[in-house]
Amino acid sequence: MEESREQYIQAVKERLAAIVDSKTAHDIIDVIAYELRDYEITKRSTEIVPYDDENEKILKSYLACLVVEGKSKGTVRMYRYSVRQLFAFLGNKRYDKITTYDIRAWLASMKMRGCKNTHIRNQRCNISPFFAWLHSDGLIEKNPMSSIKPIKVPVEERKALTSDEIDTIRDSCKSLSERAVVEVLLASGLRVAELCNLKLEDIDFDSMTVRVKSGKGNKDRTTFINPVAKKHLVAYMESNKHKSEYVFTTRESKPYTPSGIRYLTKTLAKRCGIHIHPHIFRRTLATDLARKGMPIQEIQKLLGHTSIETTRKYIETRMEKVEASYRQYVA
């Protein structure tokens, strides 16, 4: 027991050395050593326990409930991944034996690996509904998540692309498919999964409207493309000799995947030296429309947001515009 205590204190010392000065570290260690005087410490076994099929059975039941509730495939996939990650970390400990301390240890392990608070917060949010469901259905007596507070993430100003950056990105496109993807994302505000699922029958080139079928939250909506996007989309499709019902396809006529679109934007980012990801085009459209006076309620409907607060977070308000408005109203 004494050996485990010393190993624990030594491990804490090594962790503290990277984040605080030596005097503070010594003070903390002294407090820990004093408070541990009446406790015995035993290192928890990390051996993999025999596979318990109950965890997988209960997880499948939970995921089935999510599908019935109308959760999107992406949401179900994320929740399944996070819960399985937790099970794996705990050596497949039974779902009804998992404690608050187990979950805290899992979240702390991500911090130790250098994961950002945004990622850790998302993982916490992904597993929380699972334990709430277990508790509400009487499968566990106490919800271990109830004592785990939300993880704070610094609020960063969300950037939209400037007109100069958009021109630079356009110039960096080396293929018709790259240019078509960029223009459609800029004009329509589609999510990456919606772009991948876009079919030829969803686009009316005469009215330049786009039907988004079963978007996020399984909601249908209508969005639009502009003449520039139409021009490059038609050029891409004519050169591609389309053999698929999907708009954006690989050389094997298979629909693009979200990871494929992300790779495309990552490639463009390296070429032009601008931080690009698929979602930035959606944010840019929202910001541009707001600057031109489009009511936020209409932008909300265009983007398919359930909450108008989400739309507000998308719209970047530059300080220059705030200052100009201020001068105008106080003059």
Image (tube, grey):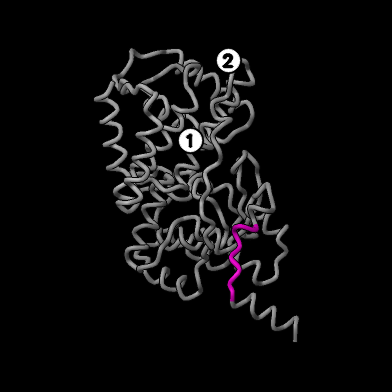
Numbered disc total: 2
Write down the region rendered in magenta.
312-319
Nearer to us: label 2 or label 1: 2
Residue furthest to the bottom: 331
Name the quadrant containing residue 70: top right
- Which amino acid type is shown beneath numbered disc 1? Met
Q: Residue at x 46, y 55 (%)?
A: 278
Residue 315, image x, y percentages: 61, 62
Residues marked 2 and 1 touching at CB (< 8 Å): no
- Callout 1 secondary element: helix
For disc 2, the neighbor class at 10 Å (few under 14, some 14 to 19, many from 20) is some
- Which amino acid type is shown beneath numbered disc 2? Leu
Q: Which residue is drawn at 75% across and 87% down?
A: 331
Residue under label 1, please give it: 78
Residue 306, image x, y percentages: 68, 46
Q: Quadrant of the N terminus?
A: top left
Residue 179, image x, y percentages: 43, 63
Name the quadrant containing residue 88: top left
For disc 1, the neighbor class at 10 Å (few under 14, some 14 to 19, many from 20) is some
Residue under label 2, please give it: 139
Is 72 covered by the magenta stretch? no
Front position in the image: 309 or 176? 309
Which mark is drawn over residue 13? none
Is 317 covered by the magenta stretch? yes
Distance from the alpha carbon under mark 2 to that under mark 1? 22 Å
Q: In this view, does 88 lie above or below 178?
A: above
Q: In this view, does 329 lie to the left or right of 138?
A: right
